[in-house]
Amino acid sequence: MGCHIRQHRWQKLKMLILRRQVRAFCSGLFADGKATLVTLAAIGSFLSGLVAFIPGVALH
């Protein structure tokens, strides 16, 4: 946080906190093999539903 502009200092601090929250969230999603499989299945289901509701998203 060496920037002399106060706004930049706050932006860097917020990004540091956000990175820690994202890391904590993702560590739970990919903690072991079972959690990873469930997470990937959920992502696949979400993408499948998105393609079903928005026909323009489908790749031809």
Image (cartoon, rainbow, N blue to C red):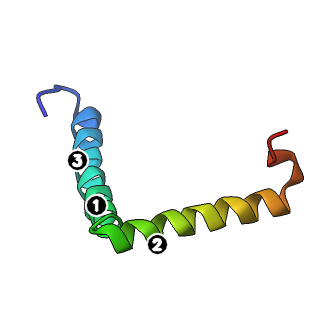
Q: Nearer the viewer, mark 3 or mark 1?
A: 1
**Location of residue 14 in the rendering, given as x and y in whole percent from the top left corner:** 28, 49
Query: The C terminus appears in which quarter of the rendering?
Result: top right
Q: Residue 21: which disc? A: 1
Circle 3/circle 1 CB separation < 8 Å:
no
Q: Residue at x 30, y 40 (%)?
A: 11
Q: Amino acid at mark 3?
A: Leu
Query: The N terminus appears in which quarter of the rendering?
Result: top left
Query: How much space separates mark 3 and mark 2, taking CA atoms?
Result: 28 Å
- Residue 51, located in which quarter of the rendered image? bottom right
Q: Residue at x 55, y 69 (%)?
A: 42
Q: Residue at x 44, y 68 (%)?
A: 37
Query: How much space separates mark 3 and mark 1, taking CA atoms?
Result: 9 Å
N-terminal label among 3 and 1: 3
Circle 3/circle 2 CB separation < 8 Å:
no
Count residues near mark 3 (Cα–Cα under 10 Å), then give few for <14, some for 14-19, many for 20+: few
Residue 58 lies left or right of residue 26; in this view the side is: right
Q: Is residue 19 depicted above or below 12 in this figure?
A: below
Residue designated by label 3: 16
Q: Is residue 25 depicted above or below 22 in this figure?
A: below
Q: Residue at x 74, y 60 (%)?
A: 50
- 25 or 21, nearer to the observer: 25
Residue 5 lies left or right of residue 57; in this view the side is: left
Circle 1/circle 2 CB separation < 8 Å:
no
Residue designated by label 2: 38
Q: Amino acid at mark 2?
A: Val
Query: How much space separates mark 1 and mark 2, taking CA atoms?
Result: 21 Å
